Image (cartoon, helix red, strand yellow):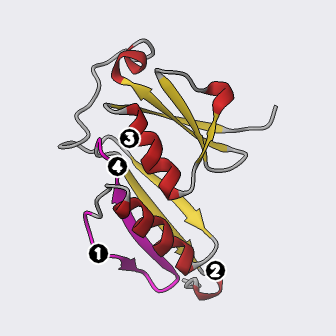
Amino acid sequence: MAKQIFINLAVKDLTKSMDFYTALGFTNNHQFSDDTAKCMVWSEAIYVMLLTHEKFSTFATKPIADTKSNLAGLFSLSVEHLEEMSKIVESGIKAGGTEPSEMKDYGFMQQRTIEDFDGHTWEVFYMDMSKMPTE
């Protein structure tokens, strides 16, 4: 089996969250989805499992963090073009997400941040390796 990553997120409104992630460009894998969980696919190796709080609690060994007021992690998605980064973030905003800060430009990398309804934070970035500093 190929190495893959599954990011599990506790969400309050499963349908609304699925619509948000679909707007970002994820697709739903129905094989691993039901009324308590939606498997959202970014690539052949990256999956986001949206889980109701009740379902998430069956896996958790600690209380679920309030990600609206506390940062539990930063998740980053790389894209192939600067325009793709902007399209993803703008689509997420139209779907109800928020952009908590302005775009950051590091010369070789541009990054925008978007948060979903539950406050899960995603950084979408484009990196041009030809502009990467040598030192």
**Mark 2 neighbour density, 10 Å: few (under 14) some (14–19) many (20 or more):** few
Q: Earlier in the sequence, mark 2 or mark 1?
A: 1
Residue position marked by numbered label 3 in the rendering: 16
* Magenta-tinted stretch: 100-118
Q: Secondary structure at mark 2?
A: helix
Identity of the amino acid at label 1?
Answer: Glu
Q: CA distance from mark 4 to mark 2?
A: 29 Å
Foreground mark, 4 or 2? 4
Please, which residue is most extreme toward the right here? 1
Foreground mark, 1 or 4? 4
Query: Residue placed at 36% from the left, 77% from the top?
Result: 104
Q: Locate residue 126, reporting x and y percent.
A: 54, 74
For the C terminus, give its image quadrant: bottom right
Identity of the amino acid at label 3?
Answer: Lys
Magenta stretch holds residue 2: no
Foreground mark, 3 or 1? 3
Q: CA distance from mark 2 to mark 1?
A: 22 Å
Q: Secondary structure at mark 4?
A: loop
**Mark 1 neighbour density, 10 Å: few (under 14) some (14–19) many (20 or more):** few
Identity of the amino acid at label 4?
Answer: Asp
Q: CA distance from mark 3 to mark 2?
A: 36 Å
Image marks 4 and 2: residues in contact by CB distance under 8 Å: no
Magenta stretch holds residue 107: yes
Q: Earlier in the sequence, mark 3 or mark 1?
A: 3
> Which quarter of the picture shows residue 66?
top left
Q: Locate residue 25, reporting x and y percent.
A: 56, 56
The image's mark for residue 116 is 4
Looking at the image, is 60 positioned above or below residue 19?
Answer: above
Query: Residue placed at 40% from the left, 32% from the top?
Result: 14
The image's mark for residue 102 is 1
Residue position marked by numbered label 2 in the rendering: 129
